[in-house]
Structures are given as C-alpha cells and as structure tokens.
Amino acid sequence: MDRKWWTLIAVCVGTFMLLLDITVVNVALPDIQKSLNCSFADLQWVVDAYSLTLAAFLLTAGVVGDMFGRRRLFAIGLAIFTLSSLACGISNSSLVLNLSRGVQGIGGAIMFATSLALIAQAFAGRERGTAFGIYGAVVGGAVAVGPLIGGAITSGIGWRWIFFVNLPFGILAILVTLWKIDEARDESGRSVDWIGFISFSASLFLLIFALVQGNDKGWGSTYIVSFLVGSAVLMAVFLLAEWKGKDPMLDLHLFKRPAMVGVSLVSLTLSGSIFAMFLYLTLYIQDVLGYAPFPAGLRFLPLTMLAFVVAPVAGKLTVKIHSRYLLGAGLLMVSIGCALMTQVNATSGWTVLLPGFIVAGIGIGTTNPVLASATVSVVPAERSGMASGSSSTFRQVGIATGIAGLGAIFQSQVTSDTTAHLSQTAAGREVLAHGSHQLSGAIAGGAVNQVANAIPVPAVRDALLTAYRTSFSGAFDHLMWIAAAVALIGSIGAVILTREKDFVPSWGPGAGGHGGDGASGSEWNADAPLPAPSH
C-alpha cells in the first residue's frame, strides 16, 4: 500500500480515538458525577479541563511540528494521550480526573495540530478532496458511535472503561505512525514563542475559571472581576507578542486574508453552538428524562449518524462547490437545528428534539470536512501546521467558553426559576422552608433527584421535581436560542469572508510543497494577490 494511505490510516485512527473519547465522556458524565460526587462545576471541568489545555497547546504544537517534524510530534501526542487515558481511568476523585483530562488535552493538542498537515502533505489535487472526505467521515463516525459506545460501556462495565478503551487504539496508531509515515518539517529555523504560549494559556485559563465560578463568587466580586481583567490584559500581551515577535506561534499576518478569518469564525461558532450544547443535551436526556447511558446514546443517533453519512459527500463536493457556500449552508442548518430544539417543556419526551437532531446532523456533516480542507487551503504549505493548530484552537476555545458561558447562564436561571416555581404552591413552599440555600447547592451539584428521593411526602417530592424540570426546560430552550444565534453568525461570516481568491493553489508531494504558481511559501506575502484556487 502507498505510504500516503498509511498516513491517512494513522491520522484517522488517532483522530477517531481522540473524538470518540470526547463523545463517550459526554454520555458518561452523569455516572461520573455520581461515582466521584462531582458538583456541576466539577462536571463542567471534566470537559473544560480537556478543552482548555487542548486550546492552549494547539498553536505551539503546530509550530513545533513544523520545526521538528510532524510525524515525530504526532507520535509523541499519541503516547501522551494514551498514557493520560490510563490515568483518567484509575482516577479516584474529580480533581485527579480533571488533572488527567488536562494532560490528555496536551496529547490531543499535538495530534490535532499535526493531523491535517500530515494529510495535506501526503495528498494533492482530487485525491486530497477524497482524503479529507474520508477524514470527515471518520470525524462523523466518532461522533456517531461515541454516545452509543459510551452508553454501552458505562451501562455494562463502568465509566472508567471509556478511557481504558483508548489504550489499544493508541498503541496501534503509534506503530503505524513510526513505521509508515514520511517525515516533513519546515527548515526555516523557527523558535518556540514562549511569551505567546504562556500569555495565551494563562488568559484562556483565567477566562474559563471566571465563567465557571462567576455564579458562586458573584459576578461583581473582586475575585471574578480580577480574573476577567487579568484575562483581558494577558490576551493583549499575547496579541502584541504575536504582532511584534520574530517567530510568533500565531502569525497574525495570516488574518489579513479574510478567508483565514472566515474559517476561524466557522471553527469557533460550530463548537460554541451545537458542540457546547452536547453537555446540556446529555443532562436533559439522562437527568431530566431519566434514560440510562445506553438508551441515551441511542437517542443521539439521528444526529450523529446523519453527520457521519453526509460528511464524505460534502468532502467530495469541495471540488465542485466553493467552500464558502458549503460552510455557510452547513452552519445555517446547525442554526435551524438548534432553533428547532427550543420546544422543550416539563412534559416533553425525547422526540421533541428529533427535528432539530436531523437538521443539525446534516449541518455538522456538511461543515466538518469542508472546514478541514479549507483550513490548510488558505495558507502556504509550510504554514499548514500553524493553520491547523489555529483552527483547532478556535474549535476548543469555542467548546470551552461555550460550555462555561452557557453553564453560567444555565445554573443561574435554573436556580432562580426553580425557587420562583416552588414559591407558588404550598408543597413548594414547604421545600423552601427546609432551606433554599441547600436547594441551590443541590441544583449546583446536580443532586436534585437525590434530594427529591429523600423526601417522604409524595406531594412535596413531586412539587420539587416539577419545579426543577420546568426550570430546566426553560433554561435549556434559552441556551438553544443562544446556540442558534451563534451558529447563524458563523454562517453569515463564512459566506462573506471565505473568499475564493484567498485560497492557495493545491500543493503536495507532486507540487514540491509549494503553491501551484511555483512561488516558495517562505516568500509568501499575505497582501499579494493569489491565483484562483484549483477547485
């Protein structure tokens, strides 16, 4: 078999493992919460600790891959991810789990930052469209089977095995990477941008921490305000360092081309809308509707299977339809899908989500492979690692800030609305008489069902559950409207910004690693006009 196909296999195996872990974890969150006695904030960190380090290390990993070899770094990322998966599986507290998830994010960052560049360096022309179509199908497949596998593993042998299952996948991918993938690097002698790395990582951490802790500490408190101000100052330091630095980990000149801004906006809004809502969809299906992990995973299939089926078709369409229209259409469908999921109420069944699942699934399947292809097509070959890292960074920033920001709104609204509903009935007032502070703690800790089960009087128990489900449904609908608006902004931005003239001609082994015009990528001028794209 040609080595380029081995490259695709290794990248797809690693990516499948990486994304499978994300979707598997979503379904297992309620069981993790019960097993480790997690609060709602702890539960957010199970996802955000991973997304935070993933976003923080992506840009640096992309540059390091360009400098020292993408194959070598991809193998290192696989090893870190595999070992940290073992650590996650043996965790005995939420703190240990979240720290292990953070390390897992470092390995994932290295893999994400180099995966698209490895494919792009191995394939050219129409074969690249086919390769990205397969890659998109793998992305969709991981999303498709993740909830089902996660539900089956969690229900059958326990949530810890959702991490242990990564071990054989990781070992296989490492062996293929070391034996079958050709090495490639940028020989320009760049150095690691430590100022940019530290300032960006610290800024993002302070922002996420403030969003997660804002409700508990008070949004106007010195504690939270200082974190938000510190985040803004550090982000300003990062932008200044990238603009003035000799070897920035993110070359801001790339963003002089609107298409680079466009694909970054798509990455941010796709993740900040439907993917950030996966946590709340899982909580609704399992905690409110009462489904066990495996039946809950089954109910995600209309969304995930459509994303899987549509992805390869969308990948092949990139040679006929320009990316701006496919990206715009995909995010528009995600927006419509989110809007269709705003009909939830206290008495709804899971089928109320079905129309939104179908439309959003088609939108995700359309967007993912096109975004992967466009990301490395708007920059020269030797900047592919940086572009891939940048796009993946925007994805993870979207997930992390989306979950944290939506979580702040969700927790505040559910707590206040539950209290308001309880105060309207005699049985509800009896619940409040036992302590509204304890109720707030139960809501924040996701323990309302446990508190209700401990109430001996049926009328009082039902009053609490009804008030909570009504409040949860109202807050859920509110979050879905926000997600719909975020996706719509991305759709409009994709059509306006992802201009055809900004795309670099196809490059690959056959093109000597340069653009089709024969110009060396190291001499690329962001302000100079480019030939029309080959597709």
Image (cartoon, grey):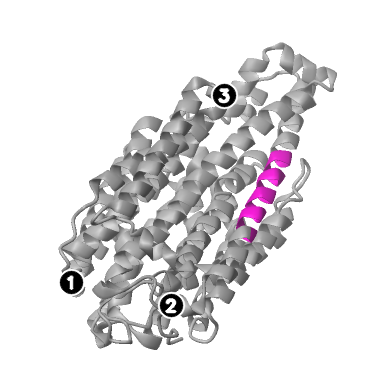
Residue 105 visible in the shown view:
yes
Of callouts 2 and 3, the N-terminal one: 3
Numbered disc 1: secondary structure: loop
Residue 5 place in picture, x, y as percent: 29, 80
Residue at mark 2 to residue at mark 1: CA–CA distance:
25 Å
The magenta span reads: 473-488
Q: Which residue is mark 1?
A: 183
Residue at image location 71% in from the left, 18% down from the top:
456
Numbered disc 3: secondary structure: loop
Position of 508 relative to 156 (above/below): below
| Disc ID at residue 493 | none
Q: Mainly helix, strand or loop, the magenta region?
A: helix
Three-letter code for the amino acid on which mark 2 is drawn: Phe
Residue 364 place in picture, x, y as percent: 56, 65
Q: Which residue is mark 2?
A: 503
Of callouts 3 and 1, the N-terminal one: 1
Q: Give the quarter of the figure containing the N terminus.
A: bottom left
Residue 255 place in picture, x, y as percent: 42, 63
Residue 167 visible in the shown view:
no
Of callouts 2 and 1, the N-terminal one: 1
Three-letter code for the amino acid on which mark 3 is drawn: Gly
Q: Which residue is mark 3?
A: 220
Position of 212 relative to 434 (above/below): below
Three-letter code for the amino acid on which mark 1 is drawn: Glu
Residue at image location 25% in from the left, 83% down from the top:
509
Q: Nearer the viewer, residue 448 or 196?
A: 196
